[in-house]
Amino acid sequence: MKTLRQVKVGETVKVVKLHGEGAVKRRIMDMGLTKGTEVHIRKVAPLGDPVEVTVRGYELSLRKADAEMIEIE
């Protein structure tokens, strides 16, 4: 299983599954990260947290913990 946190800068990947429960999963889905969505990794902060991605035409910053919950292919 590969997660969004393991992807290198400049890569574009597709969301396969969201892990997590309840409010956390709902918040990730509300940001536009749903199954089948393409995600482009733009930047990673020097210490690895947060990760800046482009989703559905807008920029989004995700914490490492949230990026770990997003399974990609």
Image (cartoon, grey):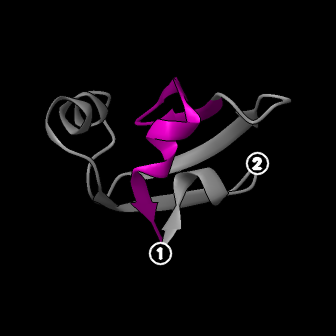
Residue depicted at 74% across the width and 34% down the height: 43
* Image coordinates for residue 20, horizontal then vertical, percent: 27, 47
Callout 1: few (<14), some (14-19), or many (20+) C-alpha neighbours within 10 Å? Answer: few
Taking the image as shown, residue 38 lies to the left or right of residue 62, namely left
Query: Residue at horizontal 81%, vertical 31%?
Result: 47
Q: In the structure shown, which secondary structural element does the residue marked by tag 2 occupy?
A: loop
Residue type indicated by callout 2: Val
Q: Nearer the viewer, residue 60 or 69?
A: 69
Residue 42 lies in quadrant: top right
Foreground of the two, 3 or 39: 3
The structure residue drawn at horizontal position 40% and vertical position 50%, both measured from the top left corner, is 69
Span shown in magenta: 51-73
> Tag 2: Cα neighbours inside 10 Å, few (<14), some, or many (≥20)?
some
User: Which residue lies under the disc numbered 2?
Assistant: 9
Does residue 61 appear to the left or right of 71 in the view shown? right
Labels 1, 2: front one: 1
- Distance between the alpha carbons at the discs numbered 1 and 2: 19 Å
Q: Where is residue 38 in the image (x, y as percent from the top left)?
A: 44, 53
Image disc number at residue 11:
none
Q: Horizontal and vertical percent for residue 45? A: 78, 28
Give the quadrant of residue 22.
top left
Percent position of residue 44, x then y:
75, 35
Residue most extreme to the left: 22
Within the magenta stretch, is there residue 63?
Answer: yes
Amino acid carrying label 1: it is Met
Q: Which dot marks residue 1?
A: 1
Mark closest to the chain's N terminus, 1 or 2? 1
* Among the 4 quarters of the image, the one containing residue 21: top left
The question of residue 15 being in magenta is answered with no
Residue positioned 66% across, 58% down in the render: 7
Q: Secondary structure beneath disc 1?
A: loop
